[in-house]
Amino acid sequence: MKDKTLSVSAINEGTVIDHIPAGQLFDVISILGLNKLETQITFGTNLQSKKLGKKAIIKIEGKFFDPDEINRIALVAPQAKLNIIHNYVVTEKRVVEVPETIVGIVKCMNPKCITNHEEVTTQFTVIDKKEVALKCHYCEKITDRKHFQIN
Amino acid sequence: MKNKSLVSISDYSKEQYLEILNLAAEFEKNPVQDILKGYVVATLFFEPSTRTRLSFESAVNKLGGRIIGFSDAGTSSVQKGESLKDTILTVANYSDLIVMRHPIEGSARFASEISPVPIINAGDGANQHPTQCLLDLYSIRKTQGTLENLNIALVGDLKYGRTVHSLLVAMSEFNPTFNFISPVELRMPEAYKIILDRKGIKYYEHTNLEDALLYADIVYMTRVQKERFSDPIEYEKVKNAYILRNSMLANTKENMRVLHPLPRVNEIAIDVDSNPKAYYFEQALNGVYTRQAIICKILGVK
């Protein structure tokens, strides 16, 4: 018998972000600035997933994202999938794509980089989309996925 | 190049390198002129680098320009906690061009984005030092007559050495063959080998210094520093393996020249100095002409 109970309740209008690695949930929340939203947001984490082991899911009522805005989460959740919901029905599915450049969000891992010493917004060129390796516009050092720290 | 900052060697194209070198050759013939009269160049050295600073100041003075600045952050308002941004915006009011050296990496790029006057990076930590690279190119061309198709041996600390990285990037425009000679711990990073692979440039890695000397047109020496090793025993094992001695030059090519960014510690034995193949002191003199060329291009007076 199939268990039809949803771990995280359905939404009427809005966006569902699924297949977030469980450990990255709070990074996704902070990258998208969900902590500043006024609408209803529900999330679940450490849910069973065949692909990820443990995954997290976020459901945001009344919010639709621009591709530019949502692609930023590809840094921490490259396998994330988006479901756009209208009237409780999935009307569109989207995947995220790692952007060419990243402004802000990530901290440069080089402790001697100017961005870690003065008020300078970080800026990176993505030099490897698969491994998500970022080259700092300022110190020219590479920050890789293992060393990501979200600003 | 007029009014454009020079932060990284990759800011310039191959054609622009050659434009600088050609102008530097003119200055070598005629180094004392009055063309910078009325110009003020600021040299802001947030960490001491006497050699580089004097080279820039000599370059400006010989062309009739004026210098303002400081040679050590301890004597400036930086010590009072002023931000780099404030220092740059203030000094830009007093000068036509800022030459800066700073221990923090990326500081010159940042300065170039906020400064109303152009910036020349005279070294930002372990990151970039493009005027050193251009004077290296000048020295190579002057001694070899060309930059094309040369055999270049890079020796010593190839992992952290910023001068060898910039030189590799710049020379890769001229179809060289590289020999990398370093301890295993200090090998050329993958990122630079990828650049060469993409351009189809040949390179070979060695741990023995003498292996590559015989074919070299240029031997570029750098220092192997103790603090770069995670294991002090490893350092002790290799510390004497990368010292160039006069006896090693016996069978090298006639046109071969030894370069070094200086200061040297012990990686080139003193007995090499009197060998006509030693070129590192002339190389430092070439720095003055090259910097005259860069400054004049950026100020738009040549």
Image (cartoon, grey):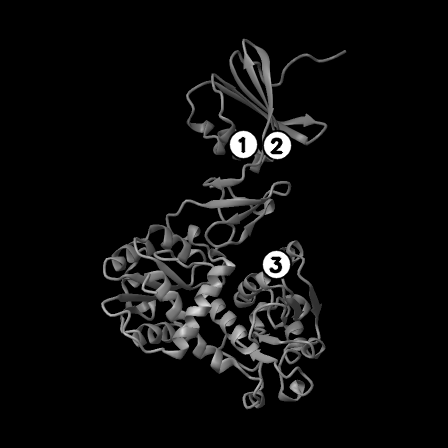
Q: Which residue is more in the foreground, B198 or A35?
A: B198
Disc 2 crowd rating (10 Å Cα; few below 14, some 14-19, many 20+) is many
Q: Chain of mark 2?
A: A
Examine the image and state in which quarter residue A24 appears: top right
Q: Earlier in the sequence, mark 2 or mark 1?
A: 2
| Label 2 to label 1: alpha-carbon separation | 18 Å
Q: Residue furthest right?
A: A1
In the rendering, which numbered label is found on residue A22? 2
Percent position of residue B3, x then y? 34, 56
Can residue B46 be seen here? The reply is no
In the rendering, which numbered label is found on residue A71? 1
Percent position of residue B257, x then y? 58, 80
Q: Which residue is more in the foreground, A111 or A131?
A: A131
Q: Which residue is more in the foreground, B220 or B123?
A: B220
Percent position of residue B11, x then y? 46, 56
Relative horizontal placement of residue B40, taking residue A68 as reference (left or right): left
- The type of residue carrying mark 2 is Ala
Percent position of residue B250, x then y? 67, 88
Q: Chain of mark 3?
A: B
Dot 1 and dot 3 within a common chain = no
Can residue B6 be seen here? The reply is yes
- The type of residue carrying mark 3 is Tyr
Number of numbered discs: 3
Q: Is residue B157 above or below residue A105?
A: below
Dot 3 and dot 2 within a common chain = no
Q: Which residue does the image show at 48% across and 55% down from the upper left?
A: A139
